[in-house]
Amino acid sequence: MTDVAAIDGTVLTVAAARIHLRVGSKVTDAELSDLVVAAQGRIESFLGRELVGATGWATVDAVPALVRHCVKLALSDFYVNREAPQLTDEQLRPIIGSKMLVTIG
């Protein structure tokens, strides 16, 4: 199994995604990697900032557990509801809305 967190800055490794989704070896590392990147992108889009980097937290380890959990929620949504993901901003707002990037002016 591949650990891609150190490579591309994702907050979940392929191994962690495999365990979370309980898919064993029936899904390839490449497929899981794509889902992890998409799930993190969904949360970054909601928050209006990247999770790790210039507008995000300094390191992967610094990302709050609640934000990391929401990436898992998005991952599950993308895996289970491949045809039409259902995780909405209204569902995310009470969980991690306080982590949103706010700009004034």
Image (cartoon, rainbow, N blue to C red):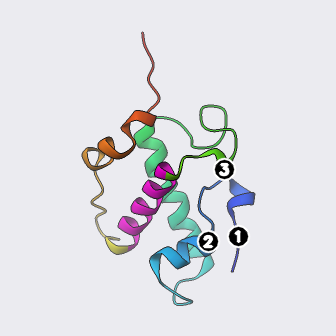
Question: What type is the residue that disc 2 sits on?
Answer: Val
Residue position for label 3: 60
Query: Is residue 67 rendered magenta in the image?
Result: yes
Indicate the position of residue 22 as horizontal and vertical percent values: 47, 83
- Chain part drawn in magenta: 66-79
**Does dot 2 land on a helix, a strand or a loop?**
helix
Image quadrant where one finds the N terminus:
bottom right
Q: Examine the rendered structure and indicate whether residue 52 appears above or below residue 68.
A: above
| Camera sees residue 39 | yes
| Residue 60 image offset from top left, x and y in percent | 66, 50
Q: Residue at x 30, y 70 (%)?
A: 83
**Can you identify the residue that label 2 sits on?**
14
Give whichever of 26, 11 is nearer the camera: 11
Among numbered discs 3 and 2, the one appearing first in the sequence: 2
Tell me how far mark 1 sits from mark 2, CA to CA: 6 Å
As drawn, which residue projects farthest toward the top? Answer: 105
Give whichever of discs 1 and 2 has the lower sequence position. Answer: 1
Residue pictured at 42% horizontal, 9% vertical: 105
The residue under the point 45% across, 36% down is 99
Query: Is 100 placed left or right of 36 in the picture?
Result: left
Kindly check if marks 3 and 1 are in contact, taking CB atoms under 8 A apart as contact: no
* Cα distance between the residues tagged 3 and 1: 13 Å
Residue 41 in sight? no
Q: Nearer the viewer, mark 3 or mark 2?
A: 3
Disc 3/disc 2 C-alpha distance (Å): 14 Å
Dot 1 amino acid type: Asp
Q: Amino acid at mark 3?
A: Val
Q: Secondary structure at mark 1?
A: loop
Give the residue number, with chain letter if any, for mark 1: 3
Numbered circle sitting on residue 103: none
